[in-house]
Image (spheres, grey):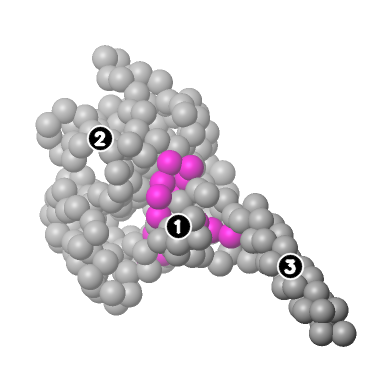
């Protein structure tokens, strides 16, 4: 009887081990290993992870804001030089004046793409900054497109901007409405920027940014479990290996 009891305990232990192993395999197979960085700007220390290129930037009232409206191409950058394919998105509010948006594939403080919105006349704009001056830029196509959302962009109102870049394929959205899509191509003697950091941007404008996210296959930030959107840090995941 004692031998049978010991045998049953070993079987139960083996069954529990196999069940746990099966559970881990299933769980890890559900995880997408694309990384994500997210900022809610509730803590002023989050600014330490960003590089101020130009302008006067401050985290205040749960947003990252350009507070001077005195500079052309005021912007802050985040990320790594080897990031290539990703989605970058944020909530944006124009606090004064007109021009503010998102930077992507920044290879330097002067060389990057930017997409932004103008409340008047109600367009989205796409530029390629280059050279060694803040305001030097070229006009890829389509350079400006009429805003395709029902609610007009107004000063003091929040809206959501999202930019998706994969290889040379680019598209951008305002409030989840597709605005335009295009292929990145050389403009004059300018090459296509194939990799680079992300950022937030304003042109002689006071503006605020919140709920900033960047995610994609090249990015090591957080792994996101898609079914219930729970996030776990890479450090926690690596302890399993």
Residue 238's disc number: 1
**Front: mark 1 or 2:** 1
Q: Position of residue 121 (x, y in %)?
A: 40, 46
The CA span between labels 2 and 3 is 54 Å
Name the disc covering residue 14, or none: 3
Residue placed under numbered mark 2 in the picture? 107
Looking at marks 3 and 1 on the same chain, the residue that comes earlier in the sequence is marked by 3
- Relative to 133, is 10 above or below? below
Quarter placement of the N terminus: bottom right
Q: Is residue 214 magenta?
A: yes
Question: Hey, which quadrant is residue 187 in on the image?
Answer: top left
Which residue is at a point 52% across and 33% down the rendered structure image?
181
In the rendered image, is residue 93 in sight? no
Q: Which residue occupies the foreground of this view, 156 or 193?
A: 193
Q: Secondary structure at mark 1?
A: helix
In this picture, which residue range is highlighted in magenta? Answer: 210-226
Tell me where residue 7 appears, x and y as whole percent. 80, 74
Identified at 40% across, 55% down, the residue is 221
């Amino acid at each position: 009887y004692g031998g049978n009891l010991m045998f049953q305990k070993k079987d139960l232990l083996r069954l529990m081990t196999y069940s746990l192993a099966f559970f881990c395999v299933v769980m890890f197979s559900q995880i997408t290993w694309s990384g994500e960085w997210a900022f809610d700007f509730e803590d002023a220390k989050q600014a330490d992870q960003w590089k101020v290129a130009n302008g006067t930037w401050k985290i205040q009232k749960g947003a990252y804001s350009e507070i001077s409206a005195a500079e052309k191409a005021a912007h802050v950058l985040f990320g790594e030089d080897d990031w290539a394919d990703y989605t970058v998105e944020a909530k944006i509010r124009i606090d004064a004046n007109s021009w503010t948006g998102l930077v992507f594939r920044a290879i330097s403080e002067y060389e990057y793409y930017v997409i932004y919105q103008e409340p008047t006349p109600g367009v989205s704009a796409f530029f390629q900054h280059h050279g060694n001056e803040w305001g030097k830029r070229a006009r890829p196509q389509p350079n400006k497109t009429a805003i395709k959302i029902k609610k007009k962009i107004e000063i003091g109102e929040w809206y959501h901007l999202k930019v998706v870049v994969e290889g040379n394929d680019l598209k951008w959205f305002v409030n989840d409405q597709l605005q335009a899509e295009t292929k990145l191509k050389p403009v004059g003697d300018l090459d296509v920027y194939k990799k680079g950091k992300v950022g937030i941007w304003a042109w002689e404008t006071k503006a605020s940014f919140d709920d900033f996210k960047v995610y994609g296959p090249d990015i090591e930030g957080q792994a996101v479990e898609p079914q219930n959107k729970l996030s776990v840090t890479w450090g926690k995941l690596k302890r399993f290996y």
